[in-house]
Image: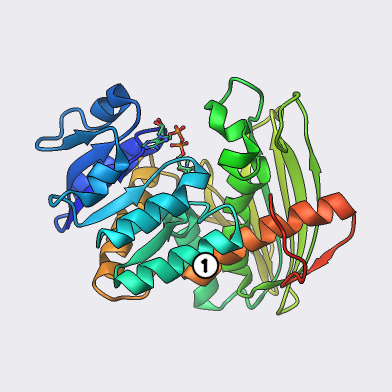
Amino acid sequence: MRIGLIGAGAVAKYHVAAAEALPGARLTAVCDIDETAAARAVQGVDGVRIHTDYRALVESSDVDAVIVNTPHSLHLPMTVDAARAGKHVLVEKPMATSLQDCDLMVQETRDAGVGLAIGHIQHFLPDKVMARDVLAAGDLGDVVMIRDHRSTDYRPGRRPEWFFSRSIAGGGALLNIGGHCLDRSLWFGGARAVDVSASVAQRFGVPVETDGMIALRLANGVGVTIAVVSDAPTHSDSLTIVCERGVIETDPRVGTLVRSDGQTRRVREPHPDDIQHAFTAQLADFLGVIDGEAPAVPLEHARHVVELVLASYESAVVQRSQQIPMLSRVTV
Ligand SMILES: NC(=O)c1ccc[n+]([C@@H]2O[C@H](COP(=O)([O-])OP(=O)(O)OC[C@H]3O[C@@H](n4cnc5c(N)ncnc54)[C@H](O)[C@@H]3O)[C@@H](O)[C@H]2O)c1
């Protein structure tokens, strides 16, 4: 599978290394409006054509599939243009910035007969995969509640400018970082959300939310709380899964811990290669999708993440919980 990477920013190196690592894949093209960034991303990789116009990349005959790794509002047009050029598409999270865009991406890729996958990396991180395996073993019983805490940094100058543009990013910390929390909480919670209540804070004088809290009730009764806090005194990326007969804690820096019968066991230690391993596994999953297999992350799940972020924004504005699916049309 000859792969073109569109967007050579923060996580490009992981996508490049994933294509290098997989026997069934080869990176043949990269595109960025910043040619220097594009060249830097593929330094040391032979035979990669560099583009500065993504349309030239998607239309080129030396690419079979693309990875869309760009600012959020570009996910839709890049996916549509790639699909119309007959290219399979792996899109970074979040799927898009509106439900209409999500639906169009699904429709266009279906019409074109190409594969579509959304890069929700949490499903491939080794500490989360271990948590999934512990749950699947069944000893801890059913999940009853989930707490998910993430720190981030939405101070001006701490990330590329587009993250602070509501029209380009689609939102702030809740969409970008809270999207990871929603993704993994829904995955481990095992059902869709039926009720959302949220509050957001907009600090540091930036035009998007910098912090947010979400409370979800899932259709199976599982309760979820999510907190995303900018510029916190300590780093956190901590997911606590409370089950009938024990508790799982997972954090990429700590590994995966299981508490039951008054005993704590570390069932997985963190490893320096964990993030790269996840990106490689995600690309392998995408190759499976191209071969007609079901994706690890269903498109409906990725769409539901966007739906819940939008419902959270609405809840924060009207200061009431929102039933899902929402009846009113929400835009960001
Ligand atoms: N999976 C993860 O853990 C993870 C982590 C970080 C970011 N992301 C996601 O990856 C995507 C990219 O984020 P990032 O942090 O790499 O941002 P970034 O700003 O570091 O990189 C984006 C790149 O896209 C390029 N770009 C912008 N417009 C373009 C265009 N029209 N054509 C070609 N290139 C264009 C920019 O020049 C920049 O180099 C986002 O969807 C983000 O949410 C995912």
Is residue 160 toward the left or the right of residue 118 in the image? right
Quadrant of the rendered structure where residue 40 is? top left
The residue positioned 88% from the left and 54% from the top of the image is 318
The residue positioned 36% from the left and 38% from the top of the image is 7
Residue 213 locus on image (x, y percent): 77, 49
The residue positioned 81% from the left and 65% from the top of the image is 322
Vertical side of 232 occupied by 287: above or below: below
Quadrant of the rendered structure where residue 146 is? bottom right
Viewer-proximal residue among 129 and 87: 87
Viewer-proximal residue among 141 and 293: 293
Is residue 193 in view from this perspective? yes
Quadrant of the rendered structure where residue 233 is? top right
Is residue 124 toward the left or the right of residue 151 in the image? left
Which residue is farthest right? Answer: 319
The quadrant in which the N terminus is found is bottom left
Is residue 258 in view from this perspective? no
Vertical side of 281 occupied by 69: above or below: above
Quarter of the render that holds ligand 1: top left
Residue 47 locus on image (x, y percent): 9, 37
Q: Amino acid at mark 1?
A: Asp
Kindly identify which residue carries mark 1.
103
Residue 39 locus on image (x, y percent): 23, 27
Is residue 173 toward the left or the right of residue 129 in the image? right
